[in-house]
Amino acid sequence: FITGQGTGVDLDKTESQYLIFPNPSSTNIYIKSPRTVGLTLYDIRGEKVLDIEHFTAGHLDVSGYKKGIYLLVFSSEEGFESRKIVFN
């Protein structure tokens, strides 16, 4: 075994600046963001199911979506952040 060698990938995670709750949810998810961001929701197959250009805080009604795992992507001038959410 070789020990002490890294992969060159920084795995340190910083805390997210986005708050999403409850997760999982079957009715609404509430999202808080420190600034206006783009918000895109993808289903597990990678298909875009929601795209909001300017979002700061509020709720999303998820009752019309199929149960499953989704990827919520926040985009801003600082970059992208993705979060896994579950609709049940």
Image (cartoon, helix red, strand yellow):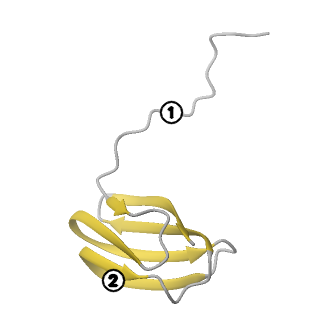
**Depth check, front residue: 4 or 82:** 82
Tell me the residue at 37%/67% (across/down).
75
Residue linked to disc 1: 10
Where residue 33 sits, quadrant-wise, is bottom left
Q: Which residue is mark 2?
A: 53
Query: What secondary structure is marked by label 2?
Result: strand
Q: Which quarter shows the N terminus?
A: top right
Number of numbered labels in the structure image: 2
Label 1 neighbour load within 10 Å: few <14, some 14-19, many 20+: few
Q: Which residue does the image show at 57% across and 72% down from the upper left?
A: 88
Which mark identifies residue 57? none
- Name, please, the residue furthest toward the bottom: 64
Report x, y in % for residue 56: 23, 73
Picture layout, residue 35 above or below residue 6: below
Q: Amino acid at mark 2?
A: Glu
Q: CA distance from mark 2 to mark 1?
A: 30 Å
Residue 53 screen position, x and y as percent: 33, 83
Query: Residue 30: x, y in percent?
Result: 32, 70
Earlier residue among tags 2 and 1: 1
